[in-house]
Image (spheres, rainbow, N blue to C red):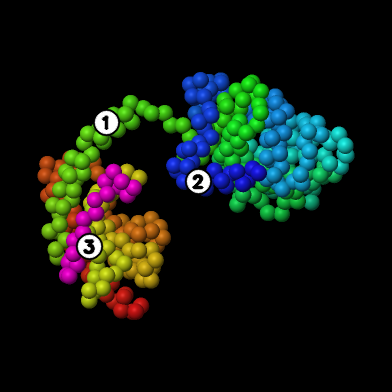
């Protein structure tokens, strides 16, 4: 039920997800009971606050408690249990041989003691894993170990339970960072998983009015602080409205002005061209924010996987750049990057702004001249400044004879 529900929701496309948006159910942040109660503590709530809220939610409604516990049990692949037959104890900061767990759930079966339940819930919001001295006397006493290793050792020595295990709730799935060799079942889920399940309870269960009220406000708290960013509430600001108005009224004019500026540097490419043709990519205000000119290296009429571009691009922030790029799937990509790394000092002798690109072997860009876009705003003659940048980049590539480098690489690997 629960995992299938997550898969169904998270696999929906953007439009379908909007139609089934579970967060339509929540009150506004300004009216949220939990957000207003703790809003002056920190920007992001701490583990303690999130643990106590989850505990309080489960302790105040048997219906909600059993649904959430059932959801958690599915994560550790528990056998099907009739949770209405259990007497549950849910509390925080319980002793684990001198240490404190975050949240513990114990379930006492009314029919069969061997069917009892014991769960430890580790809550993560901002902090990472902690390390402490081992409970297991067989381990070196002076060497700190992963916190879950200690919890697991304690769990494993608690006698017979039909379900005995632990879960970690965090903003990102921490499954890959769980320590190896744990004896009990440990699983990880995210706050987003929990939030979407809370929304499912609100939509599908017959709740009392006060239960629905409690869960809607709790869901709103999760949405603001703990779920994946795509589900978070981000308040509209005056800047957003101003930007929207400016975009509506001026984006066509802005595109035209920037495109004219970029085109002004076409002639600066001429010395690097043979039969290659200049292309102009205009994608401002679209998925790929860029307005650039450039060309594809061609030999004997055959296109290669390498290009030279210059223009305005968005790389975390708007920048003016001149760069060489190669398709990461090109068979000569690694060899080409090896040569460019060797030639960096020669490139820099013409223009000191040349720098390698981080992770260039996995991306498109190989090597670049890159300056903040604000520099062009400081120029009296912006077209002349941009043309000089392109001219400097072209002279650098001519200096290392990049066309011959590519030609020889392609010959060798043909």
What segment carries the magenta color? Answer: 272-289
> Mark 3 sits on what residue?
295
Estimate the spatial distance between the alpha carbons at disc 1 and disc 2, rounded to whole Å: 31 Å
Disc nearer the start of the sequence (3/1) = 1
Q: Secondary structure at mark 1?
A: helix
Horizontal side, residue 322 vs residue 155: left or right? left
Judging depth in this view, the residue of 380 and 99 nearest the camera is 380
Residue at 52% over, 32% down: 23
Residue 371 at what x, y percent from top left? Answer: 26, 48
> Mark 1 sits on what residue?
245
Horizontal side, residue 263 vs residue 331: left or right? left
> Mark 2 sits on what residue?
12
Q: Secondary structure at mark 3?
A: strand
Residue 222 at what x, y percent from top left? Answer: 55, 32
Which secondary structure type mostly characterizes the magenta part of the structure? loop
User: Few, some or many C-alpha atoms within 10 Å of disc 3 (few <14, some 14-19, many ≥20)?
Assistant: some
Residue 376 at what x, y percent from top left? Answer: 19, 44
Disc nearer the start of the sequence (2/3) = 2
Estimate the spatial distance between the alpha carbons at disc 2 and disc 3, rounded to whole Å: 38 Å
Residue 271 found in image quarter: bottom left
Judging depth in this view, the residue of 78 and 376 nearest the camera is 78
Residue 81 at what x, y percent from top left? Answer: 78, 41
Q: Secondary structure at mark 2?
A: loop
Q: Nearer the viewer, mark 1 or mark 2?
A: 2
Quadrant of the drawing holding the N terminus: top right
Residue at 38% over, 63% down: 328
């Amino acid at each position: 039920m629960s995992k299938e529900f997550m898969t169904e929701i998270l696999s929906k496309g953007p439009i379908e997800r909007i139609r089934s948006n579970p967060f339509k159910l929540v009150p506004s942040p300004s009216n949220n009971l939990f957000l207003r109660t703790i809003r002056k503590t920190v920007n992001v709530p701490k583990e303690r606050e999130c643990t106590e809220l989850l505990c309080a939610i489960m302790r105040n409604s048997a219906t909600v408690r059993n649904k959430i516990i059932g959801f958690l049990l599915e994560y550790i692949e528990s056998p099907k249990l009739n949770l209405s037959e259990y007497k549950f104890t849910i509390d925080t900061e319980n002793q684990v041989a001198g240490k404190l767990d975050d949240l513990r759930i114990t379930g006492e079966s009314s029919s069969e003691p061997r069917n009892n339940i014991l769960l430890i819930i580790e809550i993560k919001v901002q902090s990472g894993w902690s390390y402490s001295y081992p409970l297991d006397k067989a381990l070196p006493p002076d060497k700190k170990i992963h916190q879950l290793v200690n919890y697991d050792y304690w769990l494993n020595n608690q006698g017979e339970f039909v379900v005995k295990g632990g879960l970690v709730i965090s903003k990102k799935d921490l499954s890959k960072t769980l320590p190896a060799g744990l004896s009990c079942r440990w699983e990880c889920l995210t706050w987003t998983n929990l939030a979407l399940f809370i929304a499912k309870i609100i939509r599908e269960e017959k709740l009392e009015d006060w239960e629905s009220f409690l869960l809607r406000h709790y869901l709103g708290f999760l949405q603001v602080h703990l779920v994946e960013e795509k589900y978070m509430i981000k308040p509209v600001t005056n800047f957003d409205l101003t930007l929207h108005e400016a975009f509506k009224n001026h984006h066509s004019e802005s595109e035209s002005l920037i495109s004219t500026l970029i085109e002004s540097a076409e002639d600066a490419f001429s010395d690097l061209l043979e039969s290659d043709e200049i292309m102009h990519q205009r994608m401002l205000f679209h998925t790929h924010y860029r307005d650039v000119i450039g060309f594809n290296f061609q030999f004997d009429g055959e296109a290669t996987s390498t290009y030279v571009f210059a223009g305005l691009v968005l790389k975390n922030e708007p920048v003016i750049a001149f760069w060489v790029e190669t398709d990461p799937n090109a068979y000569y990509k690694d060899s080409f990057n090896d040569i460019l790394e060797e030639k960096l000092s020669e490139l820099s002798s013409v223009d000191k702004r040349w720098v390698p690109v981080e992770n260039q072997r996995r991306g498109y860009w190989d090597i670049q001249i890159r300056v903040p876009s604000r520099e062009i705003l400081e120029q009296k003659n912006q077209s002349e400044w941009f043309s000089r940048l392109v001219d400097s980049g072209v002279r650098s590539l001519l200096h290392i004879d990049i066309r011959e480098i590519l030609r020889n690489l392609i010959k060798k690997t043909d």
